[in-house]
Amino acid sequence: MIRRLPVLALLAIPALATAASDPHEVATRFYAALQASGPDQPVIAPLLGDALRAAIDAQRAYERACTALAAPDEKPHMLDQSPYLMAPDRPETVKVGLPATSGDASWVPAEMAIGEYRWTDRVLLQRQGQDWKVMDIRWGQGGNLIGRLKDFSAFRCTATHG
């Protein structure tokens, strides 16, 4: 029994190490998923805070409902791009900077570029349990993710066909 305790303790250490995260790592994983061929929701969803994940899920459900109400020859109310980016195109480069952390909140800059055009978004992360989660993004071009989702849902889709 005594010999089993050190083995059990060693087995528990990797689980604890993977449970904890730091803001830079989370932001890096988040932007790596965005830079992949498309927004990979199964990879991105675990990085989002509960409220933001619910808001993204609600936006997608709202888009499906608007699509069902739109006439076949009509474009439904929807975002034509990743909800996480202000720019319509994915950036060519992303460099995640050092976080500014105070307590359970952290702002992480993400420097991006498309050609010669450069901007810096700031990602808000907060601790949920042991992990850091993305809570909002303030875009360098103005506006933020939560605001965009609120504005998007303020539009009321109506049936345009009989």
Image (cartoon, rainbow, N blue to C red):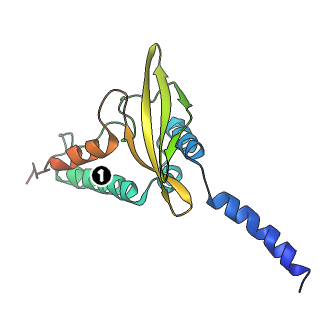
Q: Which residue is drawn at 47% across and 27% down?
A: 91
Image quadrant where one finds the C terminus: bottom left
- The answer to whether 56 is drawn above or below residue 151 in the figure is below
Q: Quadrant of residue 62?
A: bottom left
Extreme-right residue of the structure: 3
Asked if one can make out residue 18 in the rendered structure from this viewpoint, the answer is: yes
Q: In which quarter of the image is residue 28?
A: top right
Q: What residue type is labelled 1?
A: Gln
Q: Which residue is drawn at 60% across and 53% down?
A: 21
For this view, does 122 lie left or right of residue 16? left
- The answer to whether 139 is drawn above or below residue 132 in the figure is above
x and y, in percent, of residue 121 in the image: 42, 32
Asked if one can make out residue 82 in the rendered structure from this viewpoint, the answer is: no
For this view, does 158 lie left or right of residue 65? left
x and y, in percent, of residue 9 in the image: 80, 72
Q: Which residue is drawn at 52% across and 35% down?
A: 35
Image quadrant where one finds the N terminus: bottom right
Where does label 1 land, which residue? 59
Disc 1, SS: helix
x and y, in percent, of residue 112 in the image: 48, 26
